Structure formats: C-alpha cells, structure tokens
Image: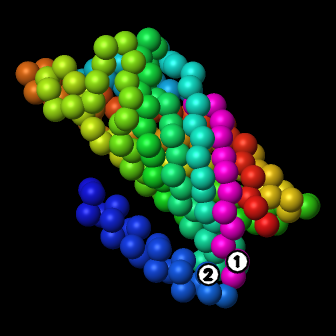
C-alpha cells in the first residue's frame, strides 16, 4: 500500500509540475472541526466507539492539471480517536479535485489517499509496537466536496476512511481497529 501511495504521489506531482508551468499554483490554509471515531471489527461483528470532537489545521496547495482538475496536497495536524481518547496525527492528504464554475466561484468534488503519522495520544495511550500501543502510521482514503469563492475563501466537508489497522494485539485474533473522521473546514487560498 505504501508503494502504491508513493507511486500515486510521484505521478500526481509530475503531472502537476508540468501543468503548473502553464497555470497558477495557489497556496492556502485550512482548519475546522473533526467528528472522529474508531471502528473495531472482527469475528463477524463491527463496533463503533463513541465520537470525539477535535480539530484540524494546516496548509494546502492547489495545483491545476487541466481546465477542471487539480491536485491538492496538504500537511495538517488532525485530531482523531474515540470518546475519552484523542489521537493526534500529522497528516498528508493528496486529493484529486474536479471543479465546476457557479456564480462568483466554483464547486469542487474530490478524493484521494492520506498518510498520517501519530504524534500524540491522551489518557495513557501511546503510539508504538507494544501489545497495548496504538499502531503507527495511519493511512486511508478521503472524499470531500465544497465551494471556493473567487476571493479565495472556501468551505468544505469531507470524510476520511482509515484503512490501517491500529491494533497491535495479535492475541485478539483478527480484530481490526480503524479511524473514521467526518470534517467540516474553512480555508483561504492566497491569490
């Protein structure tokens, strides 16, 4: 999976760089609220933990790769986890967006992979390789949609589906634990 993400990132970067020579790359900031949970699955059962409300904040770039498409990489701090336990990640999403004009701005829709490295955990939890530790790193897929005004202001909503198993306890059989995050963001792209 890591190799596939690396190849996707290199292809996207080279396409974006060649097209960026003809069109303007914009940089921006974004932040917002996360509604996160953990899902444990195994033995034919799936249990969703209680939600935790956290936040995300960071920088993004928008690299045009056609008239209606762009690649939007970023680097964010993102709070995830479950009720009673916050997991903090440095996250790198790489989303492919489709935009269509409407009024004084444009709607955008997109998806792409993300990679997150755990940097903090609350309530006695920690990232590591021990049986009781939380496995690191996290990775998964994002989907998002929103609206960006000509002024650079943007609003979006997204969902991050974790694909990495955060469970290090091999004695628990085939139980997997994964991140799930619904987010609402406000951003600004510098013109």
Answer with the quarter of the image where residue 157 lies: top right
Residue 26 part of the magenta-drawn span: yes
Quadrant showing the C terminus: bottom right
Q: Position of residue 89 (x, y in %)?
A: 42, 37
- The CA span between labels 1 and 2 is 6 Å
- Mark 1 nearby-residue class (10 Å; few <14, some 14–19, many ≥20): few
Q: Which residues are magenta?
A: 23-34
Q: Position of residue 138 (x, y in %)?
A: 34, 41
Quadrant showing the N terminus: bottom left
Which residue is located at x 76 percent, y 61 percent?
A: 190
Q: Position of residue 120 (x, y in %)?
A: 38, 29
- Mark 2 nearby-residue class (10 Å; few <14, some 14–19, many ≥20): some
**In this rendering, is residue 50 above or below 136?**
above
Q: Which mark is residue 20?
A: 2
Q: Position of residue 145 (x, y in %)?
A: 66, 50
Regarding residue 50, the answer to whether it shows in the image is yes
Labels 1 & 2 near each other (Cβ < 8 A)? yes
Q: Which mark is residue 145?
A: none
Label 2: state its secondary structure. helix
Q: Which mark is residue 24?
A: 1
């Amino acid at each position: 999976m890591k190799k596939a993400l690396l190849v996707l990132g290199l292809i996207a970067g080279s396409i974006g760089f060649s097209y960026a020579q003809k069109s303007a790359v914009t940089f921006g900031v974004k932040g917002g609220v996360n509604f996160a949970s953990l899902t444990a699955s195994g033995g034919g059962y799936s249990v969703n933990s209680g939600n935790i409300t956290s936040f995300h904040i960071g920088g993004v770039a928008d690299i045009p790769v056609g008239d209606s498409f762009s690649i939007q990489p970023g680097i964010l701090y993102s709070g995830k986890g479950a009720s009673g336990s916050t997991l903090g990640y440095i996250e790198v999403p790489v989303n492919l967006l489709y935009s269509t004009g409407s009024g004084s701005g444009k709607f955008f829709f997109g998806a792409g992979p993300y990679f997150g490295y755990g940097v903090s955990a609350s309530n006695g939890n920690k990232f590591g390789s021990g049986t009781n530790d939380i496995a690191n790193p996290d990775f998964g897929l994002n989907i998002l949609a929103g609206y960006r005004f000509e002024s650079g202001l943007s609003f979006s909503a997204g969902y991050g589906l974790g694909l990495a198993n955060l469970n290090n306890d091999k004695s628990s059989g085939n139980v997997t634990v994964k991140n799930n995050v619904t987010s609402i963001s406000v951003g600004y792209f510098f013109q």
